[in-house]
Amino acid sequence: MAEKFYENENFDNLKMEYERIESYEFYNCTFKNCSFEECILAYCSLIECKFINCKIVSLKVEFSQIKYTEFEKCNLIGVNWYDLSPTGGIADPITKFKDCILKYNSFMHINFRKFNFSLNSIQDSGFDECNLMESSFNNCCLEATQFSKCDMRKADFREATGYQISITTNKLADAKFSFPEAIKLLSELGIKLSY
């Protein structure tokens, strides 16, 4: 990757470990079967890019951003998405997760209004102060994933499992949940239920 600007390029089978990726711009590029482990993304911009069947592990970010990015069949481990948010927070950093496994991810101050998380596995992760209005988490495995101070009005959590949602710190009006998983929402109130 000698050039600094790439547009409409395809990258296949890239394997990078402990590398510093600095001052690159990618526009409308596709990454397939690539692996980025313990890399540093510095002063980079990725706009309208797609990642398909990729693995991103413990990405460190320095003054970089993504806009309108799609992920399909990816393993995303230890990513702090706030650090990748576009300057000014106007554009959406992510437009799609499809059939992805996300573990130890952090989402803070991100607009996911009407976003479709359905059928993804999001484990041991956190959503803090995000706009999740009208989003769908239908059929998601959300094992040990916490939601705090989020706007989750009209969100759909039917058939989702494992979530940890505070009913006192999140806005939940008109959100949809399935029984019996929804019973966990009452746990922080100290309510005891019997069958």
Image: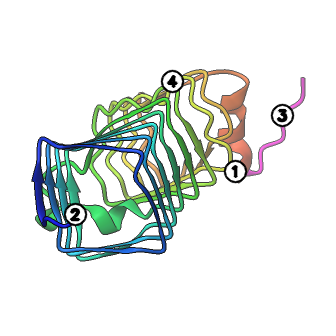
Residue linked to disc 4: 138
Q: Position of residue 183 (x, y in %)?
A: 71, 33
- The CA span between labels 1 and 4 is 25 Å
- The CA span between labels 2 and 1 is 39 Å
- Which residue is at the front of the view, 146 or 67? 67
Circle 4 SS class: loop
Q: Residue at x 84, y 41 (%)?
A: 192
- The CA span between labels 3 and 2 is 46 Å
- Which residue is at the front of the view, 103 or 127? 103
Question: On the picture, is 13 further left or further right than 185?
Answer: left
Circle 1 SS class: helix
Report the amino acid beneath label 2. Answer: Gln
Q: Which of the 4 quarters of the picture holds residue 2? A: bottom left
Residue linked to disc 1: 189
Q: Check disc 2: other Cα within 10 Å, few if <14, some if 14-19, many if 20+.
A: many
- Give whichever of discs 2 and 4 has the lower sequence position: 2
Which residues are drawn in magenta? 189-195
Q: As displayed, is residue 101 above or below residue 84?
A: above
Q: As displayed, is residue 92 above or below residue 175?
A: below
- Which mark is drawn over residue 119? none
Query: Predominant secondary structure in magenta?
Result: loop
- Give whichever of discs 3 and 4 has the lower sequence position: 4
Circle 2 SS class: strand
Residue linked to disc 3: 193
